[in-house]
Image (tube, rainbow, N blue to C red):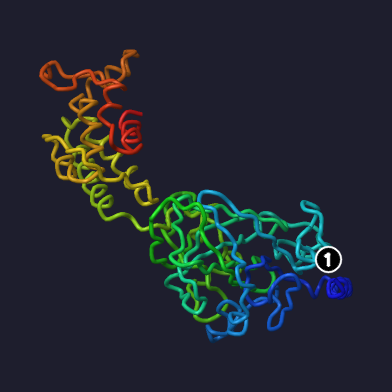
Amino acid sequence: MASLVNLALVVASVTPAVMGHMSMFTTSMYGVGPAPGFAYEYWDPVVPLGPGWMQQDEWWFRGPESRKLKPKEGEVTELPAGGSIMIEHACHVAWTQYGSSTTEVGSNLDACPGNSGAYHSGDPNSGVVDMNLLSGCALAIADVDDIEKVTMDNLAIFSVNQKCVSQKQINYEIPAAMPACTGEKCICGWFWLANNGTANFYMTAFDCKVTGATSTAKIAAPVDPTWCDPAELAAGTCKTVAGAKRPLYAYNYPTNIVWKGNYDRPGYHSNWSFQDGAQNDIFEVDETAAAISSSAAAASQSAASASSASVASALQASMAAQLASRSAQGHVPQATTTAAATTTTPTVAAASTDALGQVWHIVTQAANVKATAKSRKSWKSKNDKRHPRDFVDEDDAEDPYPTANAEELAKRCSGLDHSCELAADVLFD
């Protein structure tokens, strides 16, 4: 308790100008010693890294001494798949739940009371945070349990909060398809960049583990983020990179950003390739699903160029793309013992040996994919009360499922997972 009192006295004596920076705080972070106390033996976590540091080892997770100072054994931040976590941010540990001068959550400048300059978002003397100038924060993960095994090639951003560091308590969304760590834990990192004022870069490590994982999807190898001019991005004339991305390594060496000017500083927002919230596109695409999606896209293009192509072909391609997207997030239908029936649809026949192929075949047969564009247009124009799945050509009297309904579809989907019903919805919506 005496140490906490002394800490409060020290904090009270420090001027706001000195505490002009930010950090995340959690009991599983590296470099500060086990909580409570946060001894700061080697490095104050609110001190920025650089700018202009030439050796990566000096700034990587705050340097070698900080990497050596591990959190208390067993302290791990849990990441609930599909949920969210709250992490506290402040210009000094005193203002957090781990300190002695905890500020009221939601009060003005609760992350650094009396010091708007610490937020690096607007006029440092204004007493408020300019929400339009926030650069956002990001969380990254590497599926290794040793901090010295983390590299630029296995550390990927999985969550972004574009309003960070506007307040002390910040929520980060976790992708639903996040897989469990291979070992007992993973290594995570917190990243923040100052959007105005001094070019500050932050990279703080903490132990983490994914809980409630139901997916076996793997995080893809990350690539460097790219930048688009905001006007061009809005107009659709420039596209940023998608998929798993590395953090923005700015202001030191090596760097993975191209400097665009003081008014386009790197930050975790859309024109630097990062959308707000969980980064749901970071997972490897299942090879089977990717092949099916590619085949479906080709079929869709062919159908569009032929005036006699059926609407079902295009819808089937759409269904394949959406199923492939779900597969990329770990929702791949499980293979079953159900034998795939024969079909005269080439795309379906090629895929009928796997679970997705079975889903395709069952749904398209049950719905009678021979429904023509003319009949579908007629149904819409006449406001016919029948569902499109009930339409058949006049010469289809021998079709095994000429008037398939929901009950028949459910029977045919029996033995497969919910992706069969999902496929039906995609096909007919």
- Quarter placement of the N terminus: bottom right
Identify which residue, 249 or 100, lies in the foreground. Answer: 100
Image: 362 above or below 291: above
Amino acid type at circle 1 is: Ser
Q: Assign the C terminus to one quadrant of the image.
A: top left
Q: How many marks?
A: 1
- Image side of residue 189 versus residue 124, left or right: left
- Give percent across and percent down for residue 5: 88, 72
Q: Is residue 321 above or below residue 68?
A: above
Secondary element under disc 1, as helix, strand or loop, is: loop
Residue 162, x across and y down, in percent? 60, 56
Q: Who is closer to the viewer here, 62 or 118? A: 62
In this picture, is 132 found above or below 393?
Answer: below
Tell me the residue at 81%/64% (across/down).
125
Which residue is label 1 attached to? 100
Q: Quadrant of residue 350?
A: top left
Question: Is residue 258 toward the left or the right of residue 161 in the image?
Answer: left
Q: Is residue 125 above or below residue 212?
A: below
Q: Residues within 10 Å of mark 1 (few under 14, many from 20)?
A: some
> What residue is rendered at 39% in x and 66% in y?
221
Image position, residue 132 (x, y; %): 66, 54
